[in-house]
Amino acid sequence: MTCNTKVRRVRAWIGVALTIGFVPLAMAADNAATWSGKVAPLATPWTAEVSPGNALPEYPRPQLARPSLEHPQWMSLNGLWQYAVDDGQGAPPFGRTLKERVLVPYPVESVLSGVQKHSDFMFYRRLVDVPAAFTAHGQHVRLNFGAVAQDATVYVNGKQVARHMGGYTSFGADITQVLRPKGPQEIVVAVHAPVDGADVMVGKQRLKPEGIFYTAASGIWQSVWLEPVPATSLAQLTFTPARSLDAFTVTSKLQGGDEDTTLHVIAYADGESVGEASGPAGKPLRLAIGHPRLWSPRDPFLYTFKATLAHGDQHDEVTSYAGLRTIAIAKVGGRNRIVLNGKPTFLLATLDQGYWPDGIYTAPTDAALKFDIQKTRDLGFNTIRKHIKVEPARWYYWADRIGLMVWQDMPALPNGRNEKLRDADKARFRKDVTAIVKQLEGETSIIGWIPFNEGWGQWSIPAAAELAAQIKQLDPSRLVDARSGANCCDTKGDPHAGDVYDIHDYQGPGLPSPDATRASMDGEHGGLTLGIPGHVWPNTPINPYGAVKDRDALNAGYVANTAVLRDKGPTVGVSGSVYTQITDVEGEHNGLYTYDRKIEKVDEAKVRAINEATIRAGDQR
């Protein structure tokens, strides 16, 4: 089935729903009261664990922890903040107590936030006592935000310290100079969140969700924290594997000045030193590795690193990690194939949209964040397609550790093909793509980038080729799939660019052939649908698209669907596939798990067996 058929069926599904009704609120029986007293419309196993005292307490940035991930020096600002809705015209509420409360870092539309309502404009306010140790010995204090959707202006003690646009990238500010000598420090964040009311990256968020588009996630939706740093410190540390697979290229980005600074890095394997390098900070270093051990889904081995930045008598010590692996396109049996560490590898993926019924964009706990990745691995997949969303750093940390390769989508603009898109909006999209690539370039699990899905937000057919070239220039170490779903939907058009030719075929799977310059994959297929009463998002249409009658039929359908890849894929030379999807999401009931993560709809052993057989068959050709 082509993607045009998919669109027609989705439209038909909405029409059918008007006739046969919706899944009523009463069917979502397994509810739970949250910390605020509000009842979750659909609770996960972690909903009741969330409270103002333990809102995502883990250190949020595993690849740049000081002095170590086990013993970080930091102060979490997750928890209750004061909150107020605004009309976009109000002045920041300096020195004024706001009546409402919001639990950070859950988006305001989520039940876990305690607000459970969208606003285009909002204010957050919090008073913070900064530990005296944070400013001792000439240290500076940085205020960090994982992500805020969409446009955030940050004030400390009435002074603006940061302005950031883009709902998927982190930012921060050195707030040392605006701190008061003693007493509480006032932090105010003004947010504008137009969602699909503006031509900005929003992914599948909608103010009026229906069908394959979902509830918005506005405001602060990733962790907020303070940390002490030297006056000159590391802002980013990236380890890029050498093609020879015996070294890393270490690149660093500094904050606070880069003159007369030296970077010294030591690599460790299981606690033993296996290499070190020193040189001027801000310049690439080659870090050779003795007796290299490669990263793969079968053996997701990660090296750990201790980096010391020396600037005069000041030192910034951080720890990081990375895996040693390469990804490329190579001729195998006369066809272009994806090769991991030089070996042909079939990338068997699920579609993972990263939505939660209690936290929307934000997983309720770190254990929940890990759950989907671990279950994907348990089911025998070796890859995830992270669909039209960018996750917090800890999500990639778990993918790196558990051993899943990741296709990373760019969050789409809210419209379909829009040839009238303003040049300024195109430029902002390009800028946001660059920021996402640079932010995630150190994640071992990410093996490829997907700038466009089915033409969503794509202003022209050549735009896909343009963005593919932009990404490849930024990151030549990974693959680029210029457009996932080149055969669909209302904007058909193969850009003849990038490293992968990608089609969508529901129920499929599709078996596209590699061409003269690209490998091939089925970027979406499957979508077998089975709603489980009591475990579906309330008031959503009953979705007949791809429907099966019961769990036995779902198991049989999944095995039969994947067997096509096992039996026919190697002959064609296809390099990968993406099954829709790992969990239900709101009105879509085609997950291998229910949306609340409480019911595994399939027989794990049967799914793992066919998946592992498919990967073996694909690896051998």
Image (cartoon, rainbow, N blue to C red):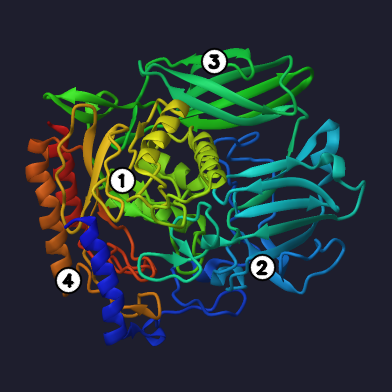
Residue 576 visible, this orientation: no
Disc 4 and disc 3: Cα gap in Å? 55 Å
The mark nearer the N terminus, 4 or 1, is 1
The mark nearer the N terminus, 3 or 2, is 2
Expressed as whole percent of the image width and height from the top left, the position of residue 106 reads 58, 62
Disc 1 and disc 2: Cα gap in Å? 37 Å
Expressed as whole percent of the image width and height from the top left, the position of residue 416 reads 39, 56
- For the residues bearing labels 1 and 2, Cβ distance under 8 angstroms: no
- The residue that label 4 is drawn on is 548
Q: Which amino acid type is shown beneath numbered disc 2?
A: Val
Mark 1 crowd level (few <14, some 14–19, many ≥20, 10 Å Cα): many
- The residue that label 2 is drawn on is 102
Quadrant into which the C terminus falls: top left
| Drawn side of residue 304 relative to residue 597, left or right | right
- The residue that label 3 is drawn on is 285
Tell me the element at label 1: loop
The mark nearer the N terminus, 4 or 3, is 3
Residue lying at 13% horizontally and 46% vertically, measured from the top left: 565
